[in-house]
Amino acid sequence: MKYGCCLNMVAGGPDGTGMEHIAALAAAGYDYVELPLAEIMALDETQFTALYQALQNANIPCEACNNFFPKTLRLTGTQADSIEQTMEYVERALARAATLGARKVVFGSGGAKNVPAGFPIEEGWRQVTELTRRIGPVARQNGILIVIEPLRKAECNLINSFAEGCRLADDVDDSNVKVLVDYYHLTEEKESVKHVEQLGPHYLGHIHFANPKGRVYPSAQDGWDYSDFVKAIKAAGYSDTLSCEAYTSEYPRAAREALEFFKANFD
């Protein structure tokens, strides 16, 4: 297993990328960085070059990007941006992700894809399905896997479970589109880990992880029982990337303890 951290969750800088923590993450022993793509797209060329150089200086890759779409880009509803405008963003965003070395991009983006009140959920599903079908080939050209992220209902009303994410992947029908499981969202929605165990061998493409109590960095001493989820991941035969997507006010100590926890449980 390779381990990384979503640095936007601990970002303190005005750009929101968390790039100021790249060197500390590398020093803590992580394999890669996960950075927010929407925030990366807001960087000018000088800032983007600085981000690229920070990764080079720390000798750590950006293997994954979360936060695919900004909230300002509407993907569902009658006010959805045109497919042409959205795909223009997709092409530029995936090109930047590829420049950083990313091989996975997370499609959660609850603010962008949340279905407006009064608009049929099934029509929102169709809009997201059509868009994802178009994204797949562009991602493939950039050497990137798209991973659909189910989100808790408090953040989005479309695709709230791993099982629903797998159904969307089926509808898209592209080998370059898989599904992410986020332990925090899975727990919030009280979804059975059996879905991960049963569907994971075919669909699972990435993991986000946090202690659900407060969505904080996990540790061996935090008192939470993760055993059923760990068993489900192993039963699914998954052993690729896992990112800690969590908050902490004690970075990088919490990051070091989380890495010890990940290696003790998932390796």
Image (cartoon, rainbow, N blue to C red):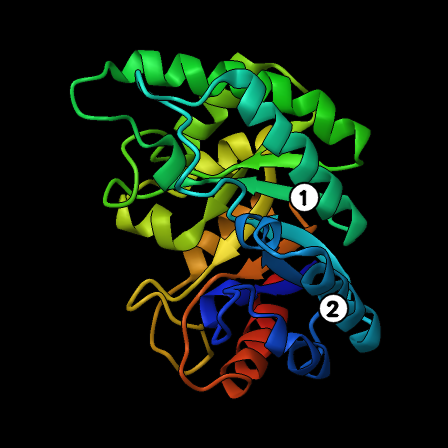
Residue 79 point in image, percent of width and height: 33, 21
Query: Please, is residue 222 above or below residue 174 in the view?
Result: below
Residue in the picture at 73% in, 37% down: 144
Amino acid type at mark 1: Lys
Residue 104 point in image, percent of width and height: 67, 43
Residue in the picture at 61% in, 62% down: 266
Residue 225 point in image, percent of width and height: 36, 66
Query: Please, is residue 69 above or below residue 169 in the view?
Result: below
Snapshot quadrant of residue 235: top right
Which of 247/187 is in front? 247
Residue in the picture at 54% in, 48% down: 38
Q: How dense is the environment of label 2, judged by Cα within 10 Å: few (below 14), some, or many (20 and up)?
A: some
Q: Is residue 57 visible?
A: yes
Q: Which residue is mark 2?
A: 50
Q: How dense is the environment of label 1, judged by Cα within 10 Å: few (below 14), some, or many (20 and up)?
A: many
Residue in the picture at 52% in, 13% down: 130
